[in-house]
Amino acid sequence: MKALRNLLDNIKPHVQKGAKFEKFHSTFDALETLFFVPNTTNKNGVHVRDAVDLKRTMALVVKALIPALLFGIWNTGYQHYLAMGVDATFWMEVGHGALKVLPIVIISYGVGLGVEFMFAQMRGHEVQEGFLVSGMLIPLVLPVDIPLWMVAVATIFSVVIGKEVFGGTGMNIWNPALVARAFLFFAYPSKMSGDLVWISGMTKGEGVVDGFSGATSLGQAASGMAPSHSIMESFIGMIPGSIGETSTLAILIGAAILIYTGIGSWKIMLSVFAGGYAMGLIFNLWGANALMQVDALHHICLGGFAFGAVFMATDPVSATRTEKGKWIYGFLIGFLAIMVRVFNPAYPEGVMLAVLLMNTFAPLIDHYVVQGNIKRRLKRAKVAA
Amino acid sequence: MSEVIKIKKGLDIQLAGKADKVFGQAELPELFAVKPTDFHGVVPKMAIKVGDKVKAGTVLFFDKNRPEIKFVSPVSGELVAVNRGERRRILEVVVKSDGSDDKEQFDTANPADLSKEEIVEKLQAAGLWPFIRKRPYDVIANASETPKAFFISGFDSAPLAPDMDFILSGSEDALQAGINVVKQLCDNVHVGVQHDAASKIFNNLKGVQVHAFEGPHPAGNVGIQIHHTLPINKGEVVWVAQPQEIVAIGKLFTEGIYDANRTVVVAGSEVEKKAYYKTKVGASISTLVKNNVKTDDKLRYISGNVLTGSHIDEDGYLGVYHSQVTVIPEGDYYEFMGWATPGFGKFSMSRSFFSWMCKKKEYRLDANMHGGLRSFVVSGQYDQVLPMDILPEFLFRAILVEDIDKMEQLGIYELAEEDIALCEFVCTSKQPLQSVLRTGIDLMIKELS
């Protein structure tokens, strides 16, 4: 630790403004602050500060994602051997899953952070921490059989178009991870939907047991069949789906961490679930097709609903920023997600589109909440007068 | 005192180093200074030259734009220095005390016999007018305006703040005399007190309305108290002053002197004898902290509290509105892997550190920023510590884009820096919100005058 500090102190003068390697200032700064919280002290204003900073906040969200990641690794292997009809041990399943999932995570982080550093370098500002979370979210919302080059392309697209063109972390309109997913979904639909992509090896047609279908429950329901997995299986997550989205249980563990630490908004999470459940009940009453007949509770355990509610909708930058707005924003996401799911003929998943749509409308919701506050203030003046 | 107003939002920072309710002994220092930077918007113009003799109450400088607002010497002695900063801006006007305590004599008077104009004139002549400030903007009051109320907060809820009841005991008559003066300026006088404190001195005051407040900091801030009792709308003005300043005003009328005496609390984790000390406005803190602080670490001396006070040297001067000196560690160290460690013993409003396991503990906080400046990311943090019907983040955004209309609509009239100091404290992105707000206020003053 001391040696590392000394090393950094030795390099530091060479990357300051005016020195030989000043171009690398932001890269150095990013590395330095990764290892050490800077020694800057408060000058004006408050003399003491809350110990939390953005790095720690983001690191905590990543920690909250770990249950979903670990479950996703295991489930990848489990589904793979299930499809092959092989009686595998737990460690074989984890081993296979790790070989499949970790490269996607590494590509996502490597490429994304590379682009971030480049932009920070060009603009001469500090590297902001937003991508620490996006870099983990992107792999978790992708199907496991996605080609690695597509992960790289989507990550570049998400960081550049989804974030940096707006000015970087804190300025983006849409959730960057969902921008990556939406990009892949519209650019390479065959790799993002269908019955084969969800289970590793199936696209290559590796020996699949007779009668095994890799279809997700939503896929089945969309084609008129009843889902073959029970609510319990969907809740625990032993079903095909994107890497991190299948286990509602693992996601709820993450939600507990986010809510307890006060970093994720419980208002948004709760209202997304409420909105989804309400729409599910309405469709149950209607009951015109198989998707409508899926039990409301089952609906919110399926697909990316829970993952979207806990990790996507709660991104504070792209969500509404007023407390009242959060209730409306969350409820509409849940409501629309199930609606899109049921009415979209092409693709039986609606969470991604619902979150992106509500990201777009979040400033509008905030606008009305702010106007409400302004009106209340004016009214007070008239009463007093 | 009929009902208790409950403040729910806010945060009490459990800072180590609370002072005992005892008086410490310290000599008065040799040097005193009045700092023009304590008064927002004042352009100082010197009235006397270096080397001139002064008495307590002799005018040192006045405001160039409002020459009737004068600033006087707290002690008798000699003007020894005018310290200037960038662009020759006057930072400190330093007086060396001769220890004789000679005072300028003013006429005593019964405020009831005087008109408002005569009282204003008297306060201005004796250098007491700067102690009457106004909301909006938190600047020295403008005598030509008619305030809708005069508000005094009878307690300070900031971290390690002094106990006003303790400070004022023995000054009951002078406080009432001051209130009588204030009543001639504005007949609608309000006092805020803490609901569970006896606050006899305030509850026994005649001619005032007393409001009781319950809740965490910033419940003791006068701006918060005004918001919950008589909120300021566009075009309205409320005048405010602090209790010790009201005492000084009282003494001008009863004894005919400029009374610079103040009781201050010296507190903070690095202070040996944490206690109350009797001193004067603008005193050098050297005699208060010398041989009275721990010397293991580099220290930060603050005139005022840790949220709003100003950073001074160990021989710096007490701010004119301050009744507190806080000493904390400077904290200019690098912390290894700070974002990943469990963080026992760290204070945070979020529960992202394991310190939530030991709730009651007192924390020895330092002046480290604990992170770098970032753009606004986390939402909803400010709302939790600002007990007002105001959306702080949107106000800050309006200020940053200099949108005057929005600033006005979103409530800038009701806020002073101290009210949003907690927002700055909890901000994950380490934004300098107090200076952002002051920028906005300065812009309002410039555009609307």
Image (cartoon, coloured by chain):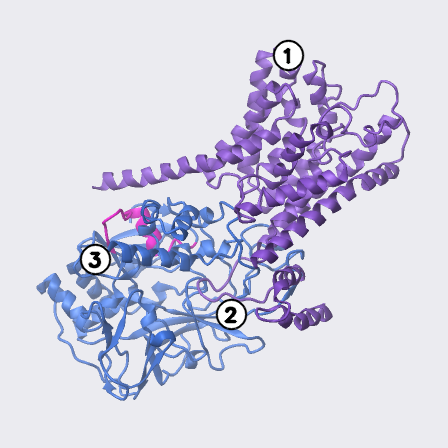
Q: Determine crowd level at label 3: few under 14, some 14-19, many 20+ residues with C-alpha closer than 10 A.
A: few
Indicate the chain on which mark 1 is placed: A
Residue B224 vs residue A330, the one in the foreground: A330
Chain represented in blue = B
| Quarter in which the C terminus of chain B is drawn | bottom left
**Relative to B35, residue A256 above or below:** above
**Among the 4 quarters of the image, the one containing residue A208:** top right
Q: Give the alpha-carbon distance from disc 1 to disc 3, as whole Å.
A: 77 Å
**Relative to A366, residue B368 above or below:** below
Q: Determine crowd level at label 1: few under 14, some 14-19, many 20+ residues with C-alpha closer than 10 A.
A: some
Q: List the residue tagged with mark 2.
A: B328
- Callouts 1 and 3 on one subunit: no
Residue B353 appears in the rendering:
no
Q: List the residue tagged with mark 1.
A: A289
- Callouts 2 and 1 on one subunit: no
Chain represented in purple = A
